[in-house]
Image: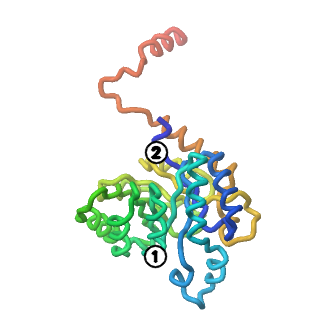
């Protein structure tokens, strides 16, 4: 029953451009309970401007196409799903050639319907995951309609992730978790949660609200040099999040209908103990 929830360890660029460090992250994510290890596939020159303050950071962390093939195989051997986010059609093609099960589109590309159509038409992925961090309701509806209107063989399933593009989220009121049910209602698609908060409280509530994919930024060491390490969940934090969300899911149980939940004996025992 707890397998109904998937947990994405967003490794992103926390490998710092090192294939060896990337593998260490995958191993640690697997041991912490992650079911998916996610990376970012990009060419720096087409992702950001040369004069951007993050250009050098991204360039240092840019992996080669062959590296993703190797990481995908490494994940396969560890029995954890490999996933990545492409930032253009060229980087998406690398993922098509690998044949990965899931492809994720970053929130600022939710309105890039050309990229979304390309993934739906030409990838052999079984699932397309769309993050909604910087989107409006109309953007989400537009992406959903694009998916529904597109007729192509073996079209991937579509999943939306509620996300707030603030990192990290400190104030409880900035999570806006009620949007999980809203997105599910307006799209009639499976919905998850990309958690940018600290700890596991937000993911616990998201699970109770129906999120069945939980994504969290992941690092093996918060003290590593890099833009994202200090704010990511370490293995202990991530493992606790997994356990907390699985426990929450179990507590939700089933609808009553005609099921007696084996409660007759419990009621009898309760009466005896309180008499």
Furthest-right residue in view?
223
Q: Residues within 10 Å of mark 1 (few under 14, many from 20)?
A: few
Q: Nearer the viewer, residue 136 or 148?
A: 148
Which residue is pictured at 46% across the width and 45% down the height? 208
**Disc on the earlier residue, 2 or 1:** 1
Is residue 31 shown above or below 21?
Answer: above
Residue 208: image tag: 2
Which residue bears the numbered disc 1?
90
Q: Nearer the viewer, residue 102 or 142?
A: 102
User: For residue 112, what is the image quadrant?
Assistant: bottom left
Is residue 89 shown above or below 4?
Answer: below
- Lateral position of residue 170 relative to residue 209, left or right: right
Q: Position of residue 205 (x, y in %)?
A: 50, 49
Q: Position of residue 198 (x, y in %)?
A: 62, 58
Q: Residues within 10 Å of mark 2 (few under 14, many from 20)?
A: some
User: For residue 180, what is the image quadrant?
Assistant: bottom left
- Lateral position of residue 226 relative to residue 68, left or right: right
């Amino acid at each position: 029953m707890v397998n109904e929830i998937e947990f994405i360890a967003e490794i992103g660029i926390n490998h710092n451009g090192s294939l060896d460090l990337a593998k260490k992250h995958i191993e640690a994510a697997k041991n912490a309970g992650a079911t998916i290890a996610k990376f970012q596939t990009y060419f720096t020159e087409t992702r950001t401007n040369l004069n951007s303050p993050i250009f050098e950071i991204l360039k240092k962390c840019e992996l080669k196409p062959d590296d993703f093939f190797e990481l995908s195989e490494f994940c396969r051997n560890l029995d954890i799903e490999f996933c990545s986010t492409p930032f253009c059609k060229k980087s998406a093609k690398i993922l098509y050639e690998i044949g990965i099960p899931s492809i994720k589109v970053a929130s600022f590309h939710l309105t890039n319907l050309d990229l979304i159509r390309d993934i739906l038409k030409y990838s052999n992925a079984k699932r397309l995951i769309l993050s909604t961090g910087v989107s409006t309701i109309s953007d989400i509806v537009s992406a959903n309609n694009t998916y529904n209107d597109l007729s192509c063989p073996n079209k991937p399933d579509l999943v939306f992730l509620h996300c707030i593009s603030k990192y990290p989220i400190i104030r409880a009121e900035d999570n806006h978790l009620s949007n999980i049910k809203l997105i599910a209602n307006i799209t009639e698609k499976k919905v998850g949660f990309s958690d940018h908060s600290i700890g596991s409280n937000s993911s616990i509530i998201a699970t109770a609200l129906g999120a069945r994919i939980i994504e969290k930024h992941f690092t093996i060491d918060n003290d590593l040099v890099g833009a994202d390490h200090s704010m990511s969940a370490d293995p202990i934090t991530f493992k606790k999040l997994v356990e907390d969300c699985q426990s929450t899911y179990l507590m939700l149980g089933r609808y009553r209908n005609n099921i007696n939940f084996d409660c007759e004996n419990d009621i009898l025992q309760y009466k005896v103990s309180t008499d």
